[in-house]
Image (cartoon, grey):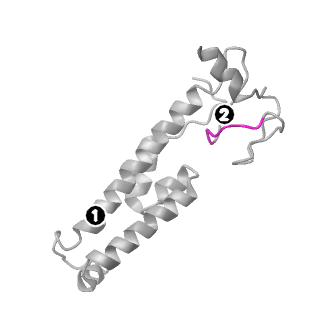
Amino acid sequence: MDRSVSQKRPWLAAVLGVLATGLGHVYLRRVRRAVGWLVALLGVSFLFVDGAALRALVSGDPVDPLAVAPVVFVGALSVIDAYLVARAHNAVARITATPDGQVTHCPNCGRELDPSIDFCQWCTTDLSGVEVGSADVADESDH
């Protein structure tokens, strides 16, 4: 495995997502996505869960599982999404180098690079020493 490519651990993203909604996405540097899941969780809890059930859940008192099922459902979807995003990130990271050794995607965040600058414009990873090529070169090598 090439250690210059930043691989994310899907299981860690999922565990962090279980601890707090959106935390797994923060680990993956997908902050907007984390905020989106947090807003979805708060919206669902506000719209579909009784306030008394939420207070009981937060205070650690026994609560009817069906009363908080919408919150659990959105939280579970967030965990699954964090796991899948990490796997997708790793898949992109594995295919970033073209046959001639040029890199078209950031080895850290997986997003497409601008070949005219020596850092990733998305996550500011220093790319000095890494030969950056255009995405067109990678596309042409597939044909």
Q: Secondary structure at mark 1?
A: helix
Q: Amino acid at mark 2?
A: His
Toward the viewer: 104 or 31? 104
Query: Closer to the observer: label 1 or label 2?
Result: 2
Query: Which corner quadrant holds the C terminus?
Result: top right
Give the residue displayed 57% in from the left and 23% down from the top.
1
Q: Amino acid at mark 1?
A: Val
What x and y, as percent, mark residue 55? 29, 83
Question: Which image quadrant is residue 6 in?
Answer: top right
Toward the viewer: 12 or 86? 86
Lower position in the chain sequence, tag 1 or tag 2: 1
Q: Which mark is residue 105?
A: 2
Toward the viewer: 23 or 134? 134
How packed mark 1 is, by other alpha carbons closer than 10 Å (few <14, some 14-19, many 20 or more), is: some
Give the residue displayed 56% in from the left and 27% down from the top.
94
30 over 139 or under it: above or below: below
What x and y, as percent, mark residue 116? 84, 36
Segment tinted magenta in the rendering = 109-114
Contact? badges 1 and 2 (CB < 8 Å):
no
Left or right: 31 as drawn, with respect to 138:
left
Give the residue displayed 40% in from the left and 67% down from the top.
40
14 over 141 or under it: above or below: below
What x and y, as percent, mark residue 37? 44, 62
Q: Main secondary structure of the magenta part?
A: loop
- Residue beneath label 1, please? 72
Give the residue displayed 67% in from the left and 14% down from the top.
99
How far apart are labels 1 and 2 at the CA level?
Answer: 35 Å
Q: Secondary structure at mark 2?
A: loop
Query: Was residue 105 drawn as part of the magenta stretch in this picture?
Result: no
47 over 33 or under it: above or below: below
